[in-house]
Image (cartoon, rainbow, N blue to C red):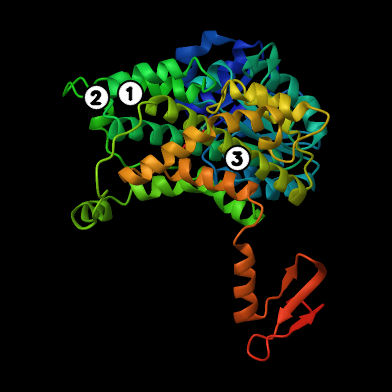
Amino acid sequence: MSAHIGVTGLAVMGANLARNLARNGFTVALHNRSVEKTDALLARHGQDGDFIRTETLQELVDSLQKPRRVLIMVKAGQPVDSVIEQLEPLLEPGDIIIDAGNSHYEDTRRREAALAKQNLHFVGIGVSGGEEGALNGPSIMPGGSKESYAALGPLLEKIAARVDGQPCCAWIGTDGAGHFVKMVHNGIEYADMQVIGEAFDLLRSGAGIEPAEQARIFAEWNTTDLASFLIEISAEVLGHVDANTGKPFVDVVVDAAGQKGTGRWTVISALELGSPTSGIAESVFARALSSQTDQRKLAQELLVGAEADIEVPATFVEDVRQALYASKLISYAQGLDMLTSAATEYGWNLKLDEIASLWRGGCIIRADLLKEITKAYAADEKPANLLFAPAFTTAIADVLPAWRRVVSTAVQLGIPVPVFSSSLAYYDGLRRKRLPAALIQGQRDLFGAHTYGRVDAEGSFHTLWGEDKSELDAVDTH
Ligand code: 6PG
């Protein structure tokens, strides 16, 4: 018996992907640096399907059908390079190495280029859905060559989540495209989690609604156009009571958010691309601020808060729901816009309708909203920005008054809503006829002779600020 695929790295994610493959009828060769993990997996879940136990990478490679498919699930960074280095001499042209971890897309691009020289395929795949998704159906974002997808795609599509009979897996694009899209998925995930957090804070601190009652409100919201995995689990977390103290669980958890880095990567990449993903950036900064616990302690003693208590409007809960919807939509719009910029920069032909579609199931940001987003990008005329798709232009116009009310109430109450408010600023920034960028151009020209364009003429101009303020035409930009 030879295996369809080999998996090396059998911590939870690798083990669950291997089990998912086996449950779907594939023979899976297993390998782990320490064989105990392999044996533990076989002892506990050997009945999931056909597994081949191997002790070395040579054995793993020898047990595989050709072209060989070896899936690596180890910690991102150096450990991936180390496994590749060991595998490379054991493989033959046409074989495929798959990296299913949360690797940085630039690493994936580098590895793909290096292995292509040996005629080996290297495929970075984004896998979302956590441990549960890996086992029962994740959302999968594969990059690498189109040719490699022909040999790998059928396996991945079989183990992926399905929505309306469609697998949540599709070839994304060459080299690092899959990992890039997964990274942006995580950026949107950060923003989505933060806006839910802001809604929770507003309902608690603004309207005095306790977590148990909020659990009920969130569960109800999950039946509206906000319906999504993150709203659903937020209701569960909010409704949970700590067994030790009898207090709401959220009140006994330290309010300092951790992060492994994919949100930060998204923002760094957005800055490099010049892509205005302000909501995602604010959500990363909000986690960073929450973790500055020493400064926060001091600030509580030193810094004053809101001047006066104001009454929240009677419509507040519904207002917050609508503001949450608007801010969430902006996060998706910004993330997808960033994908458009990246496609140009890296020469990827990213199909936003397919990407939105494979995010509909299995992944952390799965949401009903993605159905409409898929439709928007499947239209003959693709919107330049998600907000320009007629369905969303209307949807956001409908919630705009509530969104503005919530942001201004939050500001008056001193409740920080960095993503609610920056998303609104993005919306207003996009739609305003004139922006103060004109003044910034004037400033730049004055102190640095950086030149400016004119609304009424082509070319670059410079004003002789230190002289007679006359204007030079068609100056060289520098
Ligand atoms: C997923 C998740 C997953 C993980 C991230 C986020 O799509 O399944 O995004 O990749 O939860 O590592 O983790 P942090 O919040 O720790 O950055």
Q: CA distance from mark 1 to mark 2?
A: 7 Å
Q: Quadrant of the N terminus?
A: top right
Q: Quadrant of the C terminus?
A: bottom right
Q: Residues within 10 Å of mark 2 (few under 14, many from 20)?
A: some
Q: Residues within 10 Å of mark 3 (few under 14, many from 20)?
A: many
Q: Residue at x 33, y 43 (%)?
A: 415
Q: Secondary structure at mark 1?
A: helix
Q: Is mark 2 within 8 Å of ligand 1?
A: no
**Looking at the image, is mark 3 or mark 1 nearer the viewer?**
1
- The residue at which mark 3 appears reads as 184
- In the image, 10 versus 52, the foreground residue is 10
Which of the marked residues, 1 or 2, is nearer the chain's N terminus? 1
Evaluate if marks 3 and 2 touch, with contact meaning CB atoms under 8 Å apart.
Answer: no
* Tag 1 residue: 238
Task: Using the image, determine if residue 170 lies above or below residue 103.
Answer: above
Provide the residue designation for mark 2.
248
Name the quadrant containing residue 247: top left
Closer to the chain start, of discs 3 and 1, is 3
Seen at 47% across and 47% down, the residue is 282
Q: Is residue 2 left or right of residue 315?
A: right
Q: CA distance from mark 3 to mark 1?
A: 27 Å
Q: Secondary structure at mark 2?
A: loop
Badge 1 residue CB within 8 Å of ligand 1: no
Amino acid type for the residue under numbered disc 2: Pro
Cβ atoms under marks 3 and 1 closer than 8 Å: no
